[in-house]
Image (cartoon, grey):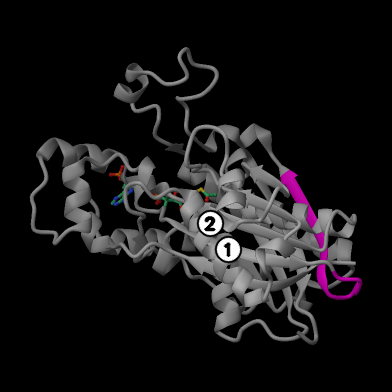
């Protein structure tokens, strides 16, 4: 008894920032970013636009695609690491913005695995008779994490003509290892309860390795500080992410395939039967490492990071939506969703596209 995906949708902001744009504000190059990460360009939301705004747009599109009206949704699950406000999360804003009525609305904080966890939670709720229709949405606005000054933003979003101060260039360069990777975007899926136990969500294998918590995190700003945010923290830049890129790479290429094997065993299927692995797009080197581990046709582990960067919780639904639109998801297709992200949360989920719509 797995839930089926009745509709998908995505939304990315209009502002496109290319690697060449970034090379104007920091010591980097299109060549370095492309070869090390696969990212060519990313989108950034306008000031004043939060993750909930992107989530609402993507959700409208998924609801339209599913032919589902707001009053038919029984539960909504939102996933983001960049909520509009420190608290509460975005679930209430999405529920109200879509006019879903006073249904249960969950906020998940599993970063790059947020959508995967959301899919599993929504499926569990539907299969345990908590409702017929669930909306799952992952959305990120990483623009706020960028350490860039107003002049830097104008240089990447404007006509590119303006020079930025030397100290801005140096500061931007200090954070280049992670700042070039991320982008903004949202993706959503509408899930419908199904009584067919050979299609829809078949099995999941979700895990957390808390010992890897510090591999990527925002060290300042939180309940361990008094006050939770201070000018000293801002001065020391502890409100910005810190990342151990090598450590993340080594764990992601080992643990995503491990979770995929575990879920295949659980469902009693062979890895060769999988048509597509929809893997989190942290960077193309990780995706390439996952392909090597599986020794499968690279086409089966697609990448779209070139156009969006790492959109964290938005990544899996955006990639799946694009694959569906491109005709790569066919009736009966067996899909494995896999993710690894901060926390460190990771896992895999198997899904069989229904034989008939
Ligand atoms: N442009 C130019 N040079 C750069 C950049 C940049 N954007 N970033 C780092 N460099 C330089 C470094 O300063 C260093 O220079 P040095 O040798 O003179 O000291 C050199 O490039 C190599 O730096 P490394 O950090 O060793 O680069 P590496 O080859 O490890 O690649 C990367 C960095 C791409 C981040 C890699 O570690 C990686 O793929 N890690 C995975 C982490 C990841 O994907 N995080 C995404 C979010 S987490 C998640 O979603 C799970």
Quarter location, residue 65: bottom right
For the N terminus, the image quarter is bottom right
User: Which is nearer the eye, 267 or 67?
Assistant: 67
| Within-10-Å neighbours for mark 1: few <14, some 14–19, many 20+ | many
At 69% from the left and 71% from the top, the residue drawn is 68
Relative to 293, say whether 148 is above or below. above
Left or right: 351, with 29 as reference point: right
Q: Is residue 153 left or right of residue 192?
A: left
- Please give the label number shown on residue 38: none
| Percent coordinates x, y for residue 85 in the rendering | 48, 36
The verdict on residue 23 being magenta is: no
Which quadrant holds the C terminus?
bottom right
Residue situated in front as seen by the camera: 281 or 312? 312
Residue name at image x 17 percent, y 39 percent? 168
Marks 1 and 2 in Cβ contact (< 8 Å): yes
Instruction: Report the span colored magenta.
Output: 194-207
Of the pair 323 and 97, the residue shown nearer to us: 97
Side of 23 relative to 199 (left or right) = left
Seen at 53% across and 56% down, the residue is 55
Residue 191 appears in which quarter of the rendering?
bottom right
Q: Is residue 338 above or below residue 113?
A: below
The percent position of residue 132, horizontal first and vertical second, equals 82, 63
Number of numbered labels in the structure image: 2
**Residue indicated by mark 1:** 59
Q: Evaluate whether residue 293 shows in this view.
A: no
Q: Position of residue 212 (x, y in %)?
A: 61, 36
Pick the front one: 283 or 160:
160
Residue underneath mark 2: 55
Tell me the quarter of the picture where residue 167 sits: top left
Q: CA distance from mark 1 to mark 2?
A: 6 Å
Residue 219, placed above or below residue 142: above
Within the magenta stretch, is there residue 199?
Answer: yes
């Amino acid at each position: 008894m797995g839930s089926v995906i009745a509709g998908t949708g995505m939304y990315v902001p209009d502002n496109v920032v290319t690697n060449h744009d970034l090379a104007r504000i920091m010591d980097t190059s299109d060549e370095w970013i492309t070869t090390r990460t696969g990212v060519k360009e990313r989108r950034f939301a306008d000031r004043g636009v939060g993750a909930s705004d992107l989530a609402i747009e993507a959700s409208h599109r998924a609801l339209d695609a599913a032919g589902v009206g707001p009053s038919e949704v029984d539960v909504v699950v939102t996933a983001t690491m960049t909520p509009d406000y420190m608290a509460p999360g975005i679930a209430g804003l999405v529920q109200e913005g879509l006019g879903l009525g006073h249904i249960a609305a969950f906020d998940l904080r599993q970063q790059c695995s947020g959508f995967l966890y959301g899919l599993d939670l929504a499926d569990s709720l539907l299969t345990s008779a908590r409702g017929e229709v669930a909306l799952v949405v992952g959305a990120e606005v990483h623009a706020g994490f960028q350490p860039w000054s107003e002049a830097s933003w104008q240089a990447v979003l404007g006509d590119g003509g303006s020079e930025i101060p030397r100290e801005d260039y140096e500061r931007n360069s200090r954070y280049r290892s992670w700042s070039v990777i991320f982008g903004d975007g949202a993706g959503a899926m509408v899930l419908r309860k199904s009584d067919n136990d050979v299609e829809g969500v078949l099995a999941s294998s979700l895990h957390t390795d808390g010992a890897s918590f510090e591999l990527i995190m925002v060290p300042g700003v939180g309940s361990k500080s008094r006050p939770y945010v201070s000018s000293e923290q801002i001065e020391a830049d502890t409100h910005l992410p810190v990342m151990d890129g090598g450590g993340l790479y080594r764990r992601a290429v080992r643990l995503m395939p491990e979770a995929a094997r575990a879920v295949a065993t659980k469902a009693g299927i062979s890895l060769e039967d999988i048509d597509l692995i929809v893997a989190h797009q942290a960077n193309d080197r990780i995706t390439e490492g996952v392909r090597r581990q599986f020794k499968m046709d690279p086409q089966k582990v697609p990448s779209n990071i070139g156009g969006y960067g790492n959109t964290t919780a938005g990544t899996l639904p955006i990639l799946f939506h694009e694959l569906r639109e491109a005709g790569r998801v066919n009736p009966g297709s067996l899909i494995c969703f896999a993710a690894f992200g901060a926390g460190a949360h990771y896992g895999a989920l198997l899904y069989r596209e229904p034989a008939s719509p």
